Image (cartoon, helix red, strand yellow):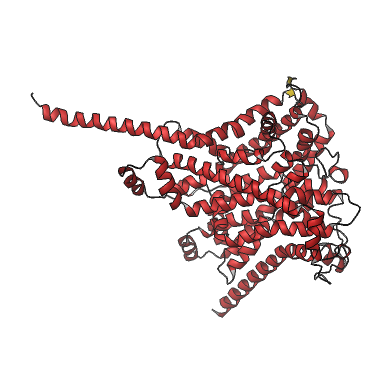
């Protein structure tokens, strides 16, 4: 009974604390998993599981009715000689090359204009965003007419002015630019995201720049641009990933049923996912289509990784230099 | 000083001009859609374009119901939209609560895994998921469009989790001292307080499901199961021998209208949703 109170107090407290912690921990673990279990199952059955499944299927011949049969790299070697597949790559790359820089510059410029505090700005913002909520099928419907070479309103002013009027959706050379154009119409999301990041640049930065005698361009170049570069980077990645997966507009405009054998004149609208869709749901070549899916997946991942490595050169994060 | 003033005014004027001109250009297609939906078919494709229909053919809006099963398509779209939205809100908010407020083993890894699938290209999962639903015998039903939403959406979970973390812990602690269980805290404290974030999710999900084209295209083949998106697509490719452009325009208008109404009603939620989902990281 030397120092029983002194000894028991902290020890007992720790023990009680531990027991309390354990009880809490069990209760939290139980309910924690209970709450997240649907999401975890969704992750397994609708996302991670299918990623691995399609990897496996890409090495098989599988037409739903019979069991998948292992054929090694045959799907991949067959793809390389598939003229339509190569065509779909050509079409898609052409789209990505046009759309990514155009949409980013366009959206960023519009966002810059909208960040100015002029009267009626909320109305402008509302109206510019409106096309982004239009369903893809409706947007294709609208532009099927809008880009009509004879009677559409895009060619109307060109004709009146006597300028060359492209045959948008019927000329193979103009089909991809037409789809880019339709995409630019529904650009509101990127504008909004850029706008939010531009308006969140602290005023003090501009004031400091002004004290240093920076003019409009210098303020943009040395304040706005670096401070929004992380969002530009994020938008770049998202836009690249989405551009590789164009489907709806091209399908509505140029394809009438899943197994239709052409996509626009000279297959000029045969986007990668369109061709993959045709193989999977028109011809039920699921192994072959899975190989296409995985190649696209790898390309997109590779590009994302390259972009992530490149960002060190041009993306500015406030946490790095902002502290000191 | 005056030179600065003039330049200032001039730059303001230019900004107004660009934004107003741009807004007008953005709106022209809507105007034309509405205008064409009120024309006789032979008046749609004319040169020069006729901006105001003359005469206004209101009859189109009655006739379209005889040509296309508009009500059926609308009802089908609503079924899919409502049940998917219910599912994604319930399952995602549950998961978000677990991730935001409870501490347990494996939580962070699960959250990271779920978040990492945000950028997963949909094409990689499309075929195996289709096969899964084929095996379950669900092709040609609405289940493939609805059921996945009952298992949470990565972006929704992320968005709600961020919001739940801003709700003061004291509120939860007080309820726990009063003996409330976790599900009860979730249902009676967290969810009511999260209304702004839930509105964002609600609006985004309604819009997404109403507009969706790919999933219905893959899973629905019978005409009387079609959603509006499928119906509108089919009407454009339907070979009737007659010019149905005006009906196409009417159907497109009918499909776009509710979206625009929701957009104007819930504009703030929309904008916040886009910005929040875009500005993570």
Task: Say whether residue B88 is left or right of residue B164.
Answer: right
Q: Camera-side residue: B280 or A208?
A: B280
- Whether residue B205 is visible, yes or no, is yes
Place of residue A169 in the rendered image (x, y in percent of width and height, measured from the top left): 84, 52
Which residue is at the far bottom? B2
Q: Camera-side residue: B87 or B14?
A: B87
Q: Camera-side residue: B122 or B234?
A: B234
Place of residue B24 in the rendered image (x, y in percent of width and height, measured from the top left): 70, 67
Q: In this figure, what is the number of numbered marks? A: 0
Task: Say whether residue A7 is left or right of residue A121.
Answer: left
Which residue is at the far left? A2
| Quarter where residue B152 is shown | top right
- Residue at position x 11%, y 26% from top? A4
Check the image and report above or below for B245 versus A21. Answer: below
- Residue at position x 55%, y 57% from top? B269
Q: Quadrant of the N terminus of chain B?
A: bottom right
Check the image and report above or below for B110 versus B87. Answer: above
| Quarter where residue B21 is shown | bottom right
Place of residue A252 in the rendered image (x, y in percent of width and height, measured from the top left): 78, 48
- Residue at position x 78%, y 47% from top? A250
- Whether residue A229 is visible, yes or no, is no
Task: Say whether residue A119 is left or right of residue B41.
Answer: left
Place of residue B103 in the rendered image (x, y in percent of width and height, measured from the top left): 40, 36
């Amino acid at each position: 009974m030397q120092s029983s109170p002194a000894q028991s107090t902290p020890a007992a407290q720790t023990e009680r604390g531990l027991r309390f912690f354990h009880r809490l921990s069990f209760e939290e673990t139980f309910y924690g998993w209970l709450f997240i279990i649907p999401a975890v199952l969704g992750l397994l059955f609708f996302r991670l599981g299918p990623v691995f499944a399609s990897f496996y299927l890409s090495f098989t011949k599988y037409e739903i009715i019979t069991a998948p049969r292992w054929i090694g790299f045959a799907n991949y070697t067959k793809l390389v000689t598939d003229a339509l597949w190569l065509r779909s790559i050509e079409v898609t790359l052409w789209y990505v090359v046009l759309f990514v820089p155009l949409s980013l510059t366009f959206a960023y410029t519009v966002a810059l204009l909208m960040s100015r505090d002029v009267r009626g700005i909320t109305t402008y913002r509302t109206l510019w965003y409106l096309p982004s909520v239009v369903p893809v099928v409706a947007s294709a419907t609208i532009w099927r007419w809008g880009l009509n070479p004879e009677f559409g309103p895009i060619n109307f002013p060109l004709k009146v002015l006597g300028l060359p009027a492209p045959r948008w959706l019927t000329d193979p050379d103009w089909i991809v630019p037409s789809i880019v154009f339709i995409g630019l119409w529904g650009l509101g999301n990127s504008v909004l995201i850029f706008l939010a990041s531009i308006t969140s640049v602290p005023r003090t930065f501009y004031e400091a720049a002004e004290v240093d005698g920076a003019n409009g361009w210098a303020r943009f170049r040395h304040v706005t641009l670096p401070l929004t570069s992380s969002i530009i980077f994020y938008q770049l990645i998202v836009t690249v990933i989405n551009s590789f997966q164009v489907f709806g507009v091209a399908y509505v405009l140029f394809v009438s049923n899943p197994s239709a054998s052409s996509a626009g004149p000279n297959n000029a609208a045969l986007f990668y996912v369109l061709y993959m869709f045709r193989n999977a749901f028109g011809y039920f070549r699921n192994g072959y289509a899975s190989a296409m899916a995985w190649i696209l997946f790898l390309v997109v991942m590779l590009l994302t990784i390259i972009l992530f490595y490149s960002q060190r050169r041009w993306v500015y994060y406030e946490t790095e230099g902002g502290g000191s | 000083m005056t030179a600065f003033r003039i330049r200032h005014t001039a730059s303001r004027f230019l900004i107004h001009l660009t934004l107003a001109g741009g807004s007008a250009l953005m709106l022209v297609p809507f105007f034309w859609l509405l205008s064409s939906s009120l024309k006789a078919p032979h008046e749609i494709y004319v040169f020069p374009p006729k901006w105001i229909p003359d005469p206004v053919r209101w009859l189109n809006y009655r006739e379209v119901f005889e040509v296309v099963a508009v009500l059926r398509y609308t009802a089908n779209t609503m079924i899919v939209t409502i049940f998917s939205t219910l599912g994604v809100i319930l399952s995602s908010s549950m998961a978000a609560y677990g991730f935001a407020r409870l501490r347990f083993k494996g939580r962070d890894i699960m959250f990271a895994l779920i978040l990492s699938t945000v950028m997963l290209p949909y094409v990689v999962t499309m075929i195996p998921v289709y096969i899964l639903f084929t095996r379950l015998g669900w092709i040609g039903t609405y289940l493939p469009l609805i059921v996945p939403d009952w298992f949470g959406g990565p972006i929704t979970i992320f968005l709600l989790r961020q919001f739940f973390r801003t709700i003061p812990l004291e509120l939860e602690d007080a309820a726990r001292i009063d003996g409330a269980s976790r599900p009860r805290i979730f249902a009676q404290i967290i969810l009511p307080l999260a209304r702004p974030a839930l509105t964002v999710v609600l609006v985004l999900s309604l819009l997404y499901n109403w507009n969706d084209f790919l999933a219905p295209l893959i899973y629905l083949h019978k005409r009387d199961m079609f959603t509006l998106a499928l119906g509108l697509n089919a009407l454009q490719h339907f070979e009737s021998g007659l010019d149905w452009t005006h009906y196409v325009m009417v159907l497109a208008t009918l499909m776009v209208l509710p979206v625009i109404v929701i957009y104007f009603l819930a504009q703030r939620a929309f904008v916040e949703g886009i910005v929040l989902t875009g500005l993570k990281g």
